[in-house]
Image (spheres, rainbow, N blue to C red):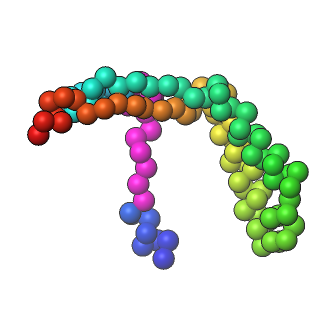
C-alpha cells in the first residue's frame, strides 16, 4: 500500500520564512504580510516533549509494541531541536489579510 501512496505525498516548500513572505507578497492577493520567527520561544519544547515521555512512561510501558516508535520519535525530536538551535530549520508564523482590491471581487 505504501508504494501506491508514495507518489501522492506532498510537502510544503522547504524555504526560509523570508522567502515564503516574498512569494506571498508577489501574488498581490494579500495585504502586508507579517512574519515571526518562533524558534527562540519554542526551542525548549522540543526536548521537553522527550522528557515528558520519560517522566510519564505509561504509553511506553503498557504498549511494548510501541518501543521502537518511542525511540524513533525521541531521536527525531532531538534532531529537530539541534537543527532549530543551529539555524538549519525555522519555525514561524505568517499573518495577512486579503487586499482591498481582492475583497471587492
Position in image of residue 36 (x %, y %): 50, 25
Give the main secondary structure of the magenta stretch.
loop
Q: Residue lying furthest left in this view? A: 105
Q: Residue at x 70, y 40 (%)?
A: 46
Q: Nearer the viewer, residue 71 or 53?
A: 53
Q: Is residue 56 left or right of residue 38?
A: right
Q: Quadrant of residue 59?
A: bottom right
Q: Is residue 69 above or below residue 88?
A: below
On screen, residue 71 versus residue 83, left or right, reads right
Image quarter in which the C terminus is found: top left
Which residues make up the magenta segment? 9-20
Which residue is drawn at the image coordinates 53% and 26% (left, top)? 37
Residue at (18, 36) in percent of width and height = 103
Is residue 82 visible in the rendered image? The answer is no
Percent x, y of residue 92: 51, 32
Residue 79 drawn at (x, y percent): 69, 41
Tag count in the figure?
0
Amino acid at each position: 500500500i505504501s508504494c501506491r501512496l508514495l507518489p501522492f505525498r506532498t510537502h510544503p516548500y522547504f524555504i526560509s520564512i523570508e522567502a515564503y513572505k516574498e512569494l506571498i507578497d508577489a501574488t498581490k492577493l494579500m495585504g502586508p504580510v507579517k512574519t515571526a520567527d518562533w524558534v527562540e520561544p519554542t526551542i525548549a519544547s522540543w526536548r521537553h516533549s522527550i522528557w515528558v515521555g520519560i517522566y510519564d512512561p505509561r504509553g511506553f510501558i503498557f504498549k511494548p509494541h510501541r518501543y521502537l516508535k518511542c525511540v524513533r520519535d525521541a531521536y527525531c525530536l532531538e534532531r529537530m531541536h539541534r537543527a532549530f538551535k543551529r539555524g538549519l530549520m525555522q519555525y514561524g508564523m505568517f499573518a495577512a489579510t486579503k487586499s482591498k482590491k481582492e475583497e471587492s471581487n
